[in-house]
Amino acid sequence: MANVSTSWRRRIVASAAALIAVSSVGPQALASSPGHSPHAAAPVSPQEFAQGDPAFYVFPDPIPAGAHGDLVRWQIVENTFDPIYRVMYLSTSVAGAPILVTGLVTVPRDPAPFGGFPMLLQGHGTTGIADGCSPSRTIEDSALTYAMDFTNLAGHASGDGFVLVSTDYEGLGSPGRHPFMVGISEARSILDAGLAAHKIPGVYIAPQTGLVGFSQGGHGALWAGQLAAEWAPQLALLGTVVVAPSSEVGGFVAAGVNDVDRSPLTVAILAGLAAAYPEAEAALPTVLTDSALELVGIMDENCFGPSMPTTPAPYIRADPTTTEPFASLLAADTPGFVASAAPVLIVHGDADENVPIADSATLLTRLCAAGQIVERRVLPGIDHGIAARDGYRDGVAWLIGLAGGATPVSSC
């Protein structure tokens, strides 16, 4: 995407400066603002790791005391374009326990405008539930594709003057199984990454924040938008962009009950619920076969893709959408029943075979009923992968318009 015009940049900078003047948000204010920490303590003193030092991923034990969103450590990633940082930060599990999460931050090479760069918080698409599938661990390996979603959006973000902050998500790159498709976990990881990015020395970020997510990340971005006012009120939310969002979680699970080719995704979603909720972990053998439980073990060690079994087995013992506690958890994990204060843009290709185009229509109906300002754009002939490219382009332009004072359109 071409750089925005000088006038757009001036309007973004002016908006950011105005927000700072009103809210007086800086690193110290971020550390002490209301709602910032359910396990409040003195702020962590973040540690810099040398470029290439593998000890970055030797996680501190015990976890440092501090607030969710505190930066624990950072490391510059070798890159010939815009500066990229690995970050490790404090967050909070669904159960309320302090956890460590990793991610990536890209900063434009241009000097920061007065008040700092506006920020995009990204929820990336599905890579797996194992640590080796995280974008921050694979960003330097061009032979792997798990960081492609991040680098795709980074090209749009940095060129248009945004800092891009992308979480690996809880348990994806850090200890424990990733709570795959668990909205609260995704949202906290996304929002806390943004709080942590504000604390990287020498990086200047304004409160003005956009949320962007693709596929699984669309699910996470929707949840982040719903929780932002409570969890991270110091972030001034511009809007939320979701591209081919995996919003209908129960529908994905139901699709795998009778379709053996789709059942591995069902297994992964149930394993994600089990990672977040003890009652789901205990009940997992009631809905999954022994073969499925073995598959969960494979998923814990390997990314989605060629390493997965090529011959599907009977994985589903009972329909999780009608079996407790899964039925209630899946219903509660569906986003869109609560409106956020910031507008939402949905972008979806009508040739998508991964996330049915009907799903975003269902999401639109639900958001409209909740009173959300939401626009849905359908991309003719575009499949799942290409939607990320085109959706990010349209989404960043939409956020720039909002920063410049544009009135969001409603499809309701």
Image (cartoon, grey):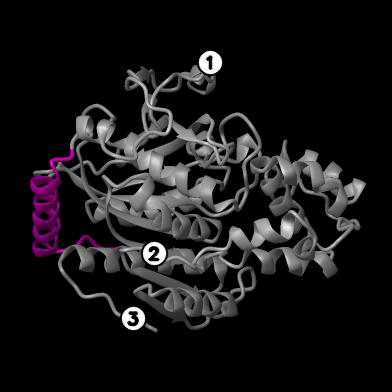
State the image quarter where residue 343 is shown. bottom left
Amino acid carrying mark 3 in the image:
Ser
Q: Can residue 369 be found in the magenta stretch?
A: no
- Pick whichever of labels 1 and 2 is earlier in the sequence: 1
Amino acid carrying mark 1 in the image:
Pro
Q: CA distance from mark 1 to mark 2?
A: 36 Å
Q: Residue at x 55, y 78 (%)?
A: 362
- Write down the region rendered in magenta: 1-25
Secondary structure under tag 3 reads loop
Q: At which x and y percent is residue 311?
A: 88, 56
**Crowd tier of the residue under label 2, counting other residues whose Cα lies within 10 Å: few below 14, some 14–19, many 20 or above:** many
Q: At which x and y percent is residue 47?
A: 36, 18
Q: Can residue 15 be found in the magenta stretch?
A: yes
Q: CA distance from mark 3 to mark 2?
A: 14 Å
Tags 1 and 2 touching, CB below 8 Å:
no
Amino acid carrying mark 2 in the image:
Val
Q: At which x and y percent is residue 360?
A: 53, 75
Q: Identify the residue position indicated by label 2 in the image.
A: 241
| Mark seen at residue 410 | 3
Is 185 in front, or is 299?
Answer: 185
> Is 24 drawn above or below residue 357 in the view shown?
above
Q: Identify the residue position indicated by label 1 in the image.
A: 62
Q: In screen coordinates, is 286 left or right of 392?
A: right
Q: In screen coordinates, is 326 left or right of 402?
A: right
Q: Residue at x 52, y 42 (%)?
A: 169
Q: CA distance from mark 3 to mark 1?
A: 48 Å
Is 79 in front, or is 10?
Answer: 10
State the image quarter where residue 25 is shown. top left
Q: In screen coordinates, is 339 left or right of 233?
A: right
